[in-house]
Amino acid sequence: MARRWIATAAGGPETWELVDAEAPAPATGEVTIRVAAAGVNPADAKHVAVERGQRWPVAIGYEVSGAVSAIGPDTRIGSGEVAVGDEVLAFRVQGGYATELTVDASTVFHKPAILTHPEAANLLLTGTTAAEMLAIAGARVGETIVLHGASGAVGVSILQQAAACGIRVVGTASEASFDRVRAFGGIPVAYGDGVRERIAAAADGAPLVAALDAVGTSEAIDASLALVADRSRIVTIVDPTRAARDGFRWIAGSQPDSARYRDAARARIIAAAASGALTVPVARIYPLADARAALALIASGHPGGALALVP
């Protein structure tokens, strides 16, 4: 019997249920995936934490890696022809915290052999978010930008994608994470009192032309506003209230323009991972039944890398 996590009403992971739920047979344009790993992201909990007009119950999880167990008639996946047993990853699905699920085939791509299932299950949400942040900020070769939350999952993807494009990144992080930031091409500075001055010093005279915010603290946003002259080049994925108030950009996968951009970026991100140019550091792997513990670590703000659930 297949199992999956669901939210039956608005609330935190403590209110969710792990239930028996068979995946339906795939119709034309659908495939069924036997899940080997599900990615764990803050959005998994955030999107069911409050009432937003959802139709309950809501199946949890947006990203998986596994093997195709069934294929609908006359169906191709996002990366082409597919056969039962092919290893794949899927992003922008619903219900990834499961042992098996049936999804729109356009969301499914062949998994790069270089990636483990836990790595593949955490590639696309962070990778496409990072790509969109760099694009919205208009970051270009030779420029120096600020990144808040440089050691987090989105931050590490930004660092790698920026380095590949010749973009210099000054990234805020805890001192314990400095080696991680350096390893992916960033210039680390400690957050806390005086962060604005430390960022400016680390830029070593180069103008700071854009700022990317993956943490949403007042300290980070205040520093960005003080250091970057063009507010259209300041982007947050965390604080829509400050963005609206102070005239900079907030993006989210729920926005139609963001969804279109991230969908279009999937193949490029997968190709970068397949070539070894984009890696996904995984900090911990949990059994599927321990989803609540994984979300608690994510909520702490210091997971140390990507987290995955393994059925």
Image (cartoon, rainbow, N blue to C red):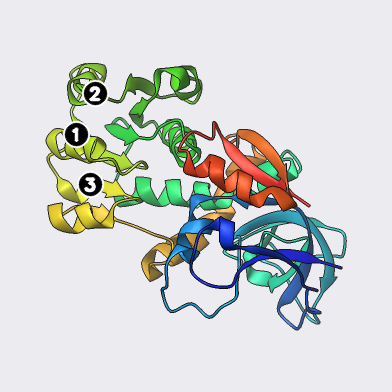
Mark 3 or 1, closer to the camera? 1
Q: Earlier along the polypeptide chain: callout 2 or callout 1?
A: 2
User: Which mark, by number, is residue 223?
Assistant: 1
Toward the viewer: 22 or 230? 22
**Quadrant of the image occupied by residue 20:** bottom right
- Which residue is tagged 3? 233
**Can you give x and y, in whole percent of width and height, for residue 106 in the image?**
64, 70
Q: Earlier along the polypeptide chain: callout 3 or callout 1?
A: 1
Q: Going by the image, does 15 lie left or right of 199?
A: right
Toward the viewer: 158 or 99? 99
Label 3, label 2: how far apart the Cα atoms are = 17 Å
Please tell me how many numbered marks the rendered image carries. Answer: 3
**Can you give x and y, in whole percent of width and height, for residue 82 in the image?**
80, 65
Please tell me whether residue 143 is drawn above or below residue 128 in the rendered image: above
**Can you give x and y, in whole percent of width and height, for residue 261 in the image?**
43, 61
Residue 136 appears in view: yes
**Can you give x and y, in whole percent of width and height, for residue 219 in the image?**
23, 35
Mark 1 is surrounded, within 10 Å at the Cα level, by few (under 14), some (14 to 19) or many (20 or more) other residues, namely some
Labels 3 and 2 touching (C-beta < 8 A): no
Label 2, label 1: how far apart the Cα atoms are = 9 Å
Toward the viewer: 296 or 83? 296
Labels 2 and 1 touching (C-beta < 8 A): yes
| SS at circle 1 | helix
Amino acid type, residue under disc 2 in the picture? Ile
Q: Earlier along the polypeptide chain: callout 3 or callout 2?
A: 2
Label 3, label 1: how far apart the Cα atoms are = 14 Å
Mark 3 or 2, closer to the camera? 2
Quadrant position of the N terminus in the picture: bottom right
- Which residue is tagged 2? 199
